[in-house]
Amino acid sequence: MTGSKFEFIQGNIACAKGAAYAGCSFFGGYPITPSTEIAEYMSEYLPKNGGKFIQMEDEIASLGSIIGAALTGAKTMTSTSGPGFSLMQELIGYACIAEVPVVIVDIMRGGPSTGLPTSPAQSDLLQAKWGTHGDHPTIALVPSSVEEMFTETVRAFNLAEYFRTPVLVLGDEIIGHMREKIRIPDPGEIQIINRTVPDNSGICPLPYASDSGKPACIPNFGKSRFHVTGLNHDITGFPTMDPAIVARENERILAKIYEQREIVDKWEEIECKDADILMLSVGSAARAAEEAVKTLRNKGIKAGLFRPLTLWPFPKDTFVKYAERAKYIIVPEMNLGQLKTVAERFTKRSKIIPVNLVNGEPISPEHIISVTNYLNI
Amino acid sequence: MFDYSKYLRASKLPHIWCPGCGHGIVMKSILRAIDKTGWEKDDIVVVSGIGCASRLPGYVDFNTLHTAHGRALAFATGIKLAKPKMHVIVVSGDGDALAIGGNHFIHACRRNIDITTIVFNNGIYGMTGGQYSPTTPDGDRSSTSPLGNMEPEFDVVKIAEGAGATFTARGTSYHVPQLDNYIHKALMHKGFSVVDVIEACYTTHGRVNKKKYPSNIDMLKFQKDNAIPIEKAKKLSEKELEGKIITGIFCEKERTEFTEKYQKIIDSFSGGEK
């Protein structure tokens, strides 16, 4: 651990430092609480290190600018919160179908609408999955600590580059503004993945050619000439309405991720193997859930926590394994039941006990424990 | 005779544009102007949004990017800032550039980023079947103004200059040699340049305004008969200029270009070693 250093920083700064570690060289953003510190950090870091920061006129333009920059070969990022994330939805779909790697950080806050700008919530768990129209792949990572804001941002860039797709990092106001001590990894300590780029020059005839179930291998603008569109396209990159090709390509951009689950899946399991009470929770709510598990275990109650770090695609196989043997599934979340709908898909509804809070306050371990008092365990 | 084959993706032709549309005329004008610059094709990016004009990038052999409705300038700004050596050209219809993309348009002007925007201004949403746009003439009928357009029009050149563009010109799809000149000058200009090209859409606009535009040829004649060069227009009263198309170069000035300024800041930290 030569040269390693420890820092006491807030989650948003850890996110920005993670982006820098991953090689982010372009940031386009728009100020919005509680994410603004990320843009502020990048506005100084990037120009001082040969990169580019631009404050765009709105969140739609922010995402547009980083998709454009990514097409030239840059690793790019934007950060926002609920209202801005809503505005970005159309272009998230664009980056999915055009297979452009970008990282979008959403520091979630209370909603709907302007809601509670300075208070925590987990309001966008489902918007992340279903917000943009059409069937599209979604990768969303949910850090629970300042350290994970760093490491998951690095992983977001790696997944974006590998799969050529937008990757979402869903922080929340607590994780974004909380300060914790973290060790900044040495250069090379975490593997950095860079997109595969063909080395042809002149006209690139088949920029969207790919092996079945794999990402396309698209050149960077300025190296060879090709066409990019948000219309359904064939392997030449040009629009097509051929039903067979449209179906094949729509399915491929899903399959390239969902058939390589070993690369994208990540979760943490705490005392899940013999858990009678299984908790499913992410982000800052999972911190309270972890504390509740400890307290319950001290009382002799077999509680456990299943915490997806990759929320989308949902690591269902492992969840189902533990959910089937558990008597109860407690789902603590700072919304009115978004993660609960996921649990309902994969386990018996009668087992599920939601714990919800949408008043701008964090969920406490006591709150979670209180729902276990009347359970038959 | 000019050899367009060097710049066209022949396999993508014929284009989608209707008989009487000006887009093909403007595309050829752009290609002649690009040829005059001597730029390498690999260094040119043509970016568009959504609409009839926005299908142009598919037909030309450059780096081409067909984005979402209204967002061409947002993508183009990212490309230019990330890779300033690229020559970035945005092609956009009037609805695309000025309605849904209006915010991006004024801010690109303000930044004075070195991008050339050509507005294919036919005063109608053609792709969706002829709804009124921000530049539909007062009183004209369209599928969403069946009683006549009640909204006043934008003046593209005035908006651009007011917002900070450093080169603005207006031409028509009738006055082609002049248009070649305006586009070439816009491409060579360092800073944000806008060429407002007055065009016609007979299919969705002319046909529902038969009294004013009896045929597609009459729509071109309308441009011929109503265009007034800016030098001449300066001597005419506001009343005399009503309904006229003022053409020419409206502004051409020097102001710090955004990506150059940015590079200077970067260089001041890297000590010139890069």
Image (tube, grey):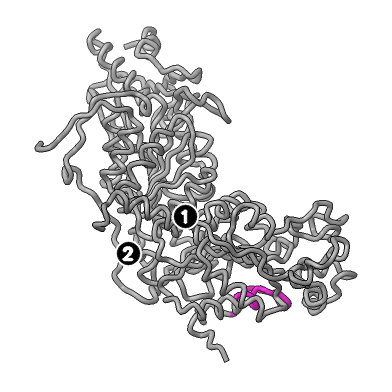
**Magenta-colored stretch includes residue B22:** yes
Circle 1 crowding by C-alpha within 10 Å: few under 14, some 14–19, many from 20: many
**Residue B203: x, y in percent?**
76, 70
- Kindly identify which numbered label has been placed on residue B23: none
Left or right side of A57 for A78: left
Disc tally is: 2
Q: Quadrant of residue A196?
A: bottom left
Viewer-proximal residue among A116 and A49: A49
**Residue B82: x, y in percent?**
39, 56
Q: Could you tell me how far apart the alpha carbons at marks 1 and 2 are, in whole angstroms? A: 41 Å
Q: Which residue is denoted by mark 2 in the rendering? A: A211
Which residue, as the protein is rendered here, is positioned at the far left? A2
Left or right side of B217 for B49: left
Relative vertical location of residue A294 with respect to residue A338 in this rendering, above or below: above
Q: Chain of mark 2?
A: A
The residue at 79%/77% (across/down) is: B224
**Residue A191: x, y in percent?**
20, 47
Residue A320 in sight? no
The residue at 52%/71% (across/down) is: B188
Circle 2 crowding by C-alpha within 10 Å: few under 14, some 14–19, many from 20: few
Q: Which residue is denoted by mark 1 in the rendering? A: B258
Q: Are marks 1 and 2 in contact (CB under 8 Å)?
A: no
The residue at 28%/12% (across/down) is: A296
Quarter the N terminus of chain A occupies: top left
**Magenta-colored stretch includes residue A72:** no
Viewer-proximal residue among A261 and B166: B166
Magenta segment boundaries in residue numbering: B14-27
| Front: mark 1 or 2 | 1
Residue type beneath disc 1: Phe
